Image (tube, helix red, strand yellow):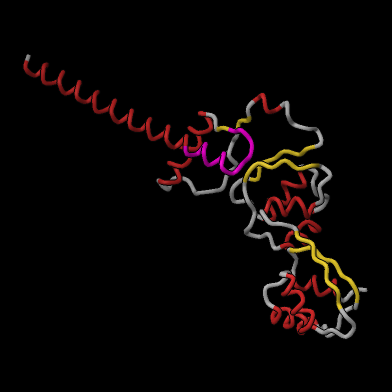
């Protein structure tokens, strides 16, 4: 009888400990779910949420990665958009999400799949010229189908397209032009501009008014200023 009572007490205590552990794990899960949802909302302007099934799958994957049973990889989060928001989509607007870990190549594939660019080589050249590598901001985006590729890339990279106008007088060389560009705020170093001119073998520019848009490589600025 004493053994039965001891066993009964042990079982009760075991159940109490087990329930406490399960409650603690559930609390952690709820907190993690909330944090993931808040993070997602911080990178998008839409009213979005992560479903409980997706959060369970994500948590399971995180545990496998933490224990070394699975290699870490970047995955696109599964997002549920509120049904009442779906009706607000304009047929002339392209909606898509840029996932974490997106690089120039994967961004190009995403844009071409949405019909926002026509070919990857032209896109890649423009992206490299704008120097958006490492600046891609993950999140949800709405783009007008008539937007220019440069405008789309600028928004995804969180940079501002800024037009500049420059007048070059007859006979002005790299030093004078570099000083003007520095005063405009188009470049950060007139000495670096002169050095790039020397590398390209440019000693003179086309006189007159010139226009260009930043960000772009200094090499492209120089090419623009040498054209009549």
Where is residue 17 drawn, in percent x and y?
A: 24, 28
Residue farthest to the left, as pictured: 2
Q: Residue at x 11, y 21 (%)?
A: 6
Query: Residue 177, percent across and down?
Result: 79, 79
Check the picture and name the quadrant holding the C terminus: bottom right
Residue 58: % across, % down: 50, 37
Residue shown at 68% from the left, 77% from the top: 189
For the residue pair 57 and 47, the one nearer the viewer reads as 47
**Is 38 situated above or below 13?**
below
The span picked out in magenta is 35-48
Look at the image and say whether residue 214 sits in the magenta stretch.
no
Query: In this rendering, would 168 be left or right of 154?
Result: right
- Along the line of sight, the residue nearer the viewer: 119 or 220: 220
Classify residue 35 as left or right of residue 125. left
Q: Is residue 49 left or right of residue 64?
A: right
Image position of 177 with respect to 38: above or below: below
Whole-percent x and y of residue 5?
11, 17
């Amino acid at each position: 009888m004493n053994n039965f009572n001891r066993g009964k007490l042990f079982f009760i205590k075991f159940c109490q400990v087990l329930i406490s552990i399960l409650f603690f794990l559930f609390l952690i899960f709820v907190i993690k779910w909330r944090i993931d949802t808040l993070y997602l909302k911080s990178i998008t302007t839409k009213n979005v949420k992560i479903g409980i099934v997706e959060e369970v799958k994500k948590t399971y994957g995180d545990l496998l990665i933490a224990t070394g049973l699975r290699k870490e990889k970047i995955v696109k989060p599964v997002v549920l958009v509120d049904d009442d928001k779906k009706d607000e989509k304009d047929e002339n607007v392209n909606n898509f999400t840029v996932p974490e870990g997106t690089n120039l190549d994967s961004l190009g594939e995403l844009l071409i799949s949405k019909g926002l660019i026509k070919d990857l080589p032209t896109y890649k050249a423009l992206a490299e010229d704008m120097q958006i590598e490492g600046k891609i901001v993950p999140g949800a985006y709405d783009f007008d189908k008539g937007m220019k590729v440069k405008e789309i890339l600028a928004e995804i990279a969180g940079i501002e397209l800024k037009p500049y106008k420059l007048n070059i007088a007859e006979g002005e060389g790299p030093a004078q032009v570099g000083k003007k560009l520095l005063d405009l705020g188009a470049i950060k170093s007139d000495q670096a501009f002169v050095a790039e001119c020397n590398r390209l073998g440019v000693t003179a520019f086309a006189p007159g008014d010139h226009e260009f848009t930043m960000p772009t490589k200094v090499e492209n600025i120089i090419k623009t200023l040498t054209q009549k």
